Image: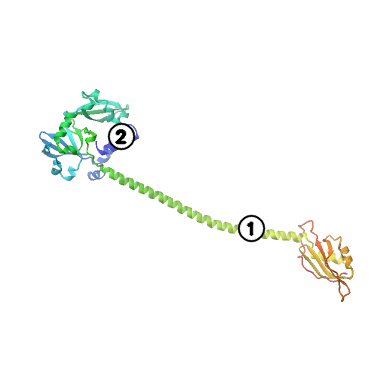
Amino acid sequence: MSALRDSFGRFGARLGPGAGGFFVWWGTALASWLPASWRAVFGLARERLLLARDGDALQLRVQTLDGLRDLGRVPWPAGAEADDPLSRLLAPSVAELPRWVLLPAGAGLRRRVLLPAAAGDRLRDVMAFEIDRQTPFPADAVYFDARVLERRGDGQIQAELVAVPKATLDTVLAGLGAPAATLTGVDIGDENSLPLQVNLLPMERRRRVADPSRRWNWILAALILSALAAGLWQILDNRRAAAQAFEREVSARADDARRVAQQRQQLLDLVEGAAFLERSRAGRPTAIAVIDDLSRRLPDGTYLEKLSMEGGKLQLIGFSTEVPQLVQHLEGSKLWHSSALAGAVQQDPRTGRDRFTLTADLAIAADPAKPAAAEPGDADAQPAR
């Protein structure tokens, strides 16, 4: 069988029973639509050189998808010749074709056998068990092959067993001489001397012919893998570029978010600071209230040189003729507490009064929300009444 038929047959066997025959038919039909030059390029031409003995001559014909073409007749080669005479007689394009011996129809025995469809993909192995029942020869006395004639709708196939006695074929091959070593197969003709498309030549004696489609298969496989790798690389590069663009966008937005967060935190700090300051101001007595209360409590003969309100402390510096009684006069105020003299009391020779320094803690109002009337600060007082 041809390389094309073998390839499609093996592929079909992997798919399921009966698929091999369909792919052989499909490949043959597809190849018939292509020009002859294209068929040769893609290995679909299925051309072969047929050698048939006609008396003392060798009939040469070329079989293609379009039919048989006679080349002529040459003398039957002598068996003792060591070289290949056909290589000298034929053009290189014809001499390089796969060579097949075509036996006459009467040289073999043909039997039709009905088999399950599943046997179609391993037809030759199945037919090896049918030789003893379908022919008068034992299995080791014949060369055989099989072909599918019909695939029936009831799940069975009509197959044909073709067998040739080994003695008959060995005689033909021995008489062929040197060209016998160049044979790819042996076919047998039907009633019209047309090849049956079987191969009776044992596998070990067949000349290995390079499958033209194998090179193209490797080239196409390499192209497919290259295109697949390029596509995957392009997808990866697109994803990488998209990831980098997304990262840049996220980074830019993160910077904006950080700036907004910093500004928001600064605003919150300002608001909280202002609120704290407002609460602090609202919780402490005002300078006017403190001065008013002091003017009411300080005795006559006392005046202040300095009055300061800072950090919750009230400090009074001044002159008085009643320094020991000042703390007593200042007690009981709602604006301060813990009044006490600080430092030594010194007499001023110019005024004849004692110089004093007095401190107290400003009272915190119970309602911190009470509005403050004025800023705390230093104030100079006039002599008390």
Q: Secondary structure at mark 1?
A: helix
In the image, residue 340 sits, relative to residue 222, either above or below, namely below
In the image, residue 56 sits, relative to residue 268, either above or below, namely above
Determine if residue 216 is in view.
Answer: yes
Residue that carries the numbered disc 1 in the rendered image = 265
Q: Position of residue 27 (x, y in %)?
A: 28, 38
Q: Which mark is residue 285?
A: none
The quarter of the image holding the N terminus is top left
Q: How far apart, in angstroms, are the residues tagged by discs 2 and 1?
A: 78 Å
Residue that carries the numbered disc 2 in the rendered image = 20
- Please give left or right for residue 39 compared with residue 53 in the image: right
Dividing the picture into quadrants, the one containing residue 47 is: top left
Q: Residue drawn 88% across and 63% down?
A: 328
Q: Position of residue 201 (x, y in %)?
A: 21, 33
Which amino acid, mark 1? Answer: Gln
Mark sitting earlier along the chain (2/1): 2
- Please give left or right for residue 169 compared with residue 253 in the image: left
Q: Position of residue 317 (x, y in %)?
A: 82, 69
The quarter of the image holding the C terminus is bottom right
Dividing the picture into quadrants, the one containing residue 159 is: top left
Badge 1: few (under 14), some or many (20 or more) residues near its Cα, within 10 Å?
Answer: few
What kind of colouring is applied to the model shown? Answer: rainbow
Dividing the picture into quadrants, the one containing residue 53 is: top left
Q: Position of residue 245 (x, y in %)?
A: 48, 55
Badge 2: few (under 14), some or many (20 or more) residues near its Cα, within 10 Å?
Answer: many
